[in-house]
Image (cartoon, rainbow, N blue to C red):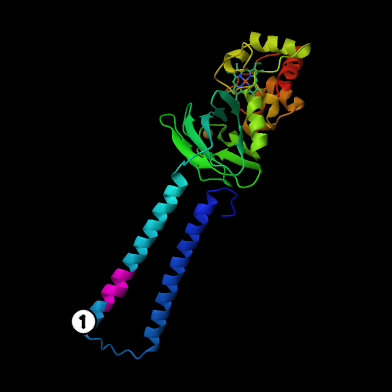
Amino acid sequence: MSGLGGASSVVTPFLVLTFALAASVCVVVLVALALALSRTPTIDLASDLGLRLVLVVGGAVPAAIVALYLVASLLAASALAAPAAASVSVDVIGHQWWWEFRYGDVATANELHIPVGERIELRLISADVIHSFWVPDLQGKTDALPSQTNRMWLLAEKAGRYDGVCAEFCGVQHAWMRLVVVAEPRSDFDRWLARQGEPRRTGSGVAAEGERIFDMHVCASCHTIRGSAANGKVGPDLTHLASRSLLGAGVLPNNTGTLRAWLADPAHFKPGVLMPNVSLSDTELDALVAYLGSLD
Ligand code: HEC
Ligand SMILES: [Cu+2]
């Protein structure tokens, strides 16, 4: 319960209440037991007094405790569920085996940026099988289903990076369906979002050649690069790929070397991955890396 998110401020008091109730009941029972054992075992309670004791101590008091506890748990559950007054709403789409994050028309993958200290609403859905979105430091798990939208909220109290995973077995690369939440001050977040909303940076030289290869090969049929001819919907949006820290939902850090290795043979890093192994010459690889590496 050392979480850094708004959810822990709901769960922690509830847990304290649970332990406090359980401990006091336990103490009362033990004291009563000790008293009973220390007295001479002469049972001379008048029968109506005995009956009243059983009704009150054995019936009414436990019923009151359970009722109190029920009310407390309903309040905690509704505080955890309510996506009240979110300042930012993000559509989270689970795919085998990566996460798509959409801020309106702006799409990115595997790296969820949020402003710190604000309540963010997530609308979860799946493009294929059942996934489950889980960032342990910030919130409990919520399923992403193909058939319905589930809502949850996140609140990061401190700026920083929070690791998350898919928590529902969803196929061979389930374990490499990670994500990172980047919680940053509002002004950084606004700058980030404005940048992500821009079309791709137009390159020259090798990068321009890379764009031509990207559009000519099958790449463009699966990936969108806003502002270019590529508008595929199967894989992650690559418009600002170079601004992300992860490749392949966490299987590799994102830099020139890993990007080249990924493009040359994605299945080497993620066997079963739904990106095919496109055969590319060394010069084509260089050009693609120059192009994609320029998309910050
Ligand atoms: C059949 C569809 C398909 C084709 C064709 C395809 N990709 Fe992909 N690509 C994907 C999928 C799906 C992923 C996500 C893989 C994962 O993380 O599990 C992906 C991931 C990537 C990533 C990593 C993105 C990230 O944010 O992690 C890059 C870069 C990439 N593809 C570039 C390319 C290039 C360049 C080509 C052409 C040579 C290409 N892709 C062809 C489907 C495709
Ligand atoms: Cu999954």
60 falls in the magenta region: yes
Q: Position of residue 28 (x, y in %)?
A: 41, 76
Residue occupying the far left of the picture: 48
Q: Residue at x 47, y 58 (%)?
A: 14
Q: Quadrant of ligand 1?
A: top right
Which of the 4 image quarters holds residue 173? top right
Q: Position of residue 49 (x, y in %)?
A: 24, 82
Which of the 4 image quarters holds residue 236? top right
Looking at the image, residue 266 sits to the left or right of residue 71; the answer is right
Label 1, residues with CA under 10 Å away: few <14, some 14-19, many ≥20: few
Q: Residue at x 66, y 36 (%)?
A: 187
Q: Nearer the viewer, residue 86 or 208?
A: 86
Q: Which residues are magenta?
A: 53-61
280 shown above or below 293: above
Q: Nearer the viewer, residue 176 or 222?
A: 222
- Please tell me how many numbered marks the rendered image carries: 1
233 shown above or below 140: above
Name the residue carrying label 1. Answer: 48
Q: Position of residue 67 (x, y in %)?
A: 34, 61
254 shown above or below 285: below
> In the rendered image, is residue 272 in sight?
no
